Image (cartoon, rainbow, N blue to C red):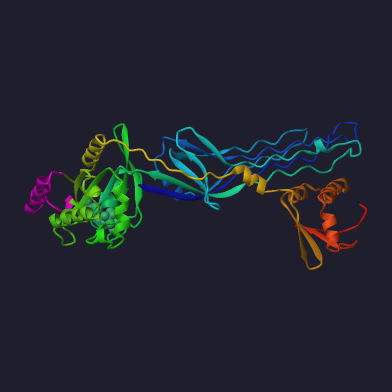
Amino acid sequence: MFVDRAKIHIASGKGGNGAVTFRREPYVPEGGPDGGDGGKGGDVVFEATKDLRTLMDFRYKKKYKAQDGENGRKKKQYGKYGEDLVIKVPEGTMIFDEESGKLLADLTTAGTRFIAAKGGKGGKGNVHFKSSTRQAPNFAEAGGFSKERDVILELKLIADVGLVGFPNVGKSTLLSVCTKARPKIANYHFTTIAPNLGVVTVGDTDFVMADIAGIIEGASKGAGMGFQFLKHVERTKVLIHVVDVSGSEGRDPVDDFEKINKELADYSDRLAAKPQIVCANKIDMADTDSEEYLRFKEHVEAKGYKVFPVSAPINIGTQELMNEAAAVLSTIEDVPEESFYEMFDFEAEERDEDYSVITIREEDDAYVLEGRQLLKIFNSTNFNDIGSLRYLYKYIEKSGIIDQLKERGLEEGDTIRIEDFEFEYIDEF
Ligand SMILES: Nc1nc2c(ncn2[C@@H]2O[C@H](COP(=O)(O)OP(=O)(O)OP(=O)(O)O)[C@@H](O)[C@H]2O)c(=O)[nH]1
Ligand SMILES: [Mg+2]
């Protein structure tokens, strides 16, 4: 089983701020408040689709942000909602919260959706803050915060086909020409150390092909990173055994073929028993009529395997090879697997995140206040307006924090700081 994994950062849209505006009418010197509400920020939504088969795309793009809501406008006009960001993932993708490691969602079937980060609420416009005593509210509510989190996407794949062979024989090249995967290809051993996955399409079916690191003699005993590599291919259904038939590194292809098969058999009976198709690669540097090639072909065929001459980089013989893999696969039945995970508790998270908590920090000569809800109201405050300031002050007073501050020795004239704003404490406001 192959685990395709990606870590990405998601952020929902921030809510738009409520507007502070007043009606302007001819002959009415001071119209009432008419500031509209800010729009809600967009959600980050994951949606399972059949159109994707791997998490490859997430290797390149790591940050995802939904649109912010627009600010409210005059004449009670609402700000536009931020657009949701829908992130498509293959069926079977599990989404984990990076911080807690818990499972957020398991999107098994196409069309299933999951909101992983809710957009901030839109702030209320000043039109909502008019009262009998406050005719001209000079403040409005700030939009709700964006929600950010790192998530791990995990897709367990039964790779249908595994590419095995010595290092440098062209396994990654083959994957790169048959699928959209872009593994690193280079002329040295162990270019590939972690599996790469790609989807091969043959007619109207497709299958997942995995390219693993090269296998060397002794791999079954742990040489190189043998165990790990072999474990990867153990769950595949069909093996494509890639052999460099040009002998470009001075080895004998027949010998290569036997050595790899011995490692597979030494590792497990299951591996040895897998259907195998032989890819005689680098045929551009060999001759199909040559004695060496014919000796190899006869040797392999005598053991009951089919041989396909291929030149991966120039795409010769690859189609025939993939057709054969699809044909063999169609004869093998799927074995479903089940797994269990502890689900992430969203409600607990909401409970834990008590927005109304205000903390006090004593710093230099000031008491510093911090808290999410406080910050939001602070952001909504119009510091040139006494009514707006009073609203902030009332909120602080109601929270009981003033009493706590007094217990710590707060006196008239002491400085209280919120963000970068400082004010002197006075008993009556
Ligand atoms: N002439 C020729 N060169 C090839 C062919 N296939 C691959 N190569 C070259 O062989 C070298 C190794 O190719 P890779 O695809 O990286 O081989 P690999 O089996 O994935 O190698 P490791 O990941 O190190 O195990 C590269 O320089 C390729 O360009 C082929 O059919 N003909
Ligand atoms: Mg490779």
Residue 128: x and y, percent? 81, 36
Marker count (numbered): 0
Q: Quadrant of residue 121?
A: top right
Q: In this image, 194 relative to 280: left or right?
A: right
- Dominant secondary-structure state across the stretch colored magenta: helix
From the viewer's perspective, tell me whether residue 297 is left or right of residue 142: left
Of 348 and 396, which appears nearest the observer? Answer: 348
- Who's the residue at 25% across and 55% down the image? 267
Rendered image quadrant of residue 91: top left
Residue at the location (29% across, 52% down)? 172
Residue 276 visible in rendering:
yes
Q: Quadrant of residue 217?
A: bottom left
Residue 243 in magenta stretch: no
Residue in the foreground of this view, choosing between 169 and 241:
241
Determine the residue located farthest toward the right in the rendered image.
Answer: 428
Residue 314 in sight: no
Residue extent of the magenta highlight:
283-305
Q: Is residue 76 left or right of residue 221?
A: right
Tell me where residue 74 appears, x and y as whole percent: 77, 36
Q: Is residue 133 left or right of residue 170?
A: right
